[in-house]
Amino acid sequence: MDDKTHEIWNVRFISRIIDSMADGVFTMDANGRISSWNPSMERISGYTAKEALGKTCQLLQFSYCFGKPCPANIKRCKILEKTYSEAKECVLRHKDGHDVPVIKNASVVRDENVIGIVETVTDLTELNQAREKAKEAALRLGEVYRMDNIIGKSRAMQQVFSAISAAASSEATILVQGESGTGKELVAGAIHFNSERREGPLVTVNCSALSESLLESELFGHVKGSFTGANRDRRGRFEEASGGTIFLDEIGDLSPFIQVKLLRVLQEREIERVGDSKKRKIDIRIITATHKDLYSRVREGHFREDLYYRLKVFPIQLPTLRERREDIPFLTDHFIASMNEKTGKSVAGLSKAALRIFMDYPWPGNVRELENAIEHAFVLCDRKMIDSADLPIEIRQPDTTRYRKTLIDASYSPKKMRPKLSPEALRELLDECDWNKAEVGRRVGLSRTAIWKYMKKWGIPLQKG
């Protein structure tokens, strides 16, 4: 191949590369006239190469050009002085008249004299749409976790609101305690979205849902090859929460190994990925929650005392629904309004009989159980008012003896009262509780993790079939 043929081949090869680029690329000659225009420029601007060739870049009406309007004469263009421009976000005017968000960059090609100018244009339309969706999602999440979405006018809830406000204005580690269904995640979200970290992420991890090895990888991340199946590096949830808050739910179920690692995170504010020795600094706020009595677990030797005191720098105790029955009418009104919006119905409220049942019921599942009861009633209710017949049967006809023994009697001991569990009994309980493993655990005096292990042992599916 002679030199001339080689040069022609190179020109064709470079042209093919430029034509295949996703970014728009165009060139201008020494007089500022467009001399080439790739297909991506046609897509981004709406102008064909035939329409653009021979014109100046004023055709695109860029909104930003060295801080000044684009000059009519190339000789007065700052690019000739600077020889390149920094990549800047701006907009260009599409052929049909609308503005297209882009990043533009330019550089001068010269030997002894100016040969020409190369400009690249990156279309930001899809990226900006993704940004807007992320903003909208964050706003919606912020709406969900607004403090006034935590319903309650009782004295007990007023104390909770005061604690949330105090927690939000500090960086202290928070321990939220309360029975399942009392709204621990809602409180954690309210603290985050009312704090200085509201612009950062809120990352939630359920510590009882994963085995020790999976939880370690989930929290700390791992490096490629650190275990079977680790085919790439992966950031953990601590790193993902950088600049924001991590919420560790069911903290009482942590294994001793993970407790040690979490203690180190609290002390040093740094982590090591599984299989890595590199320490990585993290900037996070830690909020934890549990339905268990952590101090009892410390006394029994199941939870580290030093970690316990690190976690409960600022404890928040959530009251059960039984302890704030005066809030039940407000909560039912809130859930009915929400369900009306979802279903298009116009249910006005509860009948006196239904409200009396609600007020007398012990609510082992707390606010979550109340919400589920309203949703159940909406399926059956075809009138203006929810009546007692629309309520779940376990609320209309509760096993009073069982609830009195397991939930109201302060002297109840799960170890003494625990019934013998069998695969058949467990399946029956799962059906009764709509496969809510935490609720099954409460009824038999076991943890949700223990129920999960029994299901694995007896080959019972983890989700309702």
Image (cartoon, rainbow, N blue to C red):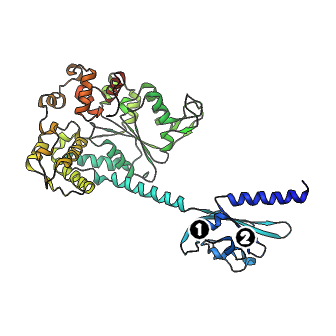
Image coords of residue 307 (percent x, y) = 41, 31
Q: Nearer the viewer, residue 344 or 363?
A: 344
Q: Residue at x 28, y 37 (%)?
A: 180
Residue linked to disc 2? 79
Residue, far left:
353
Q: Residue at x 17, y 55 (%)?
A: 347
Instruction: Identify the element where label 2 is drawn.
Output: helix
Residue linked to disc 1? 90
Image coords of residue 205 (percent x, y) = 41, 38
Residue 114 seen anywhere in this rendered image of the structure = yes
Sequence order check: which comes first, mark 2 or mark 1? 2
Residue, far bottom:
72
Tell whether 146 sits left or right of 29.
left
Image coords of residue 407 (percent x, y) = 18, 31
Amino acid type at mark 1: Cys
Dot 2 and dot 1 residues touching (CB under 8 Å) = no
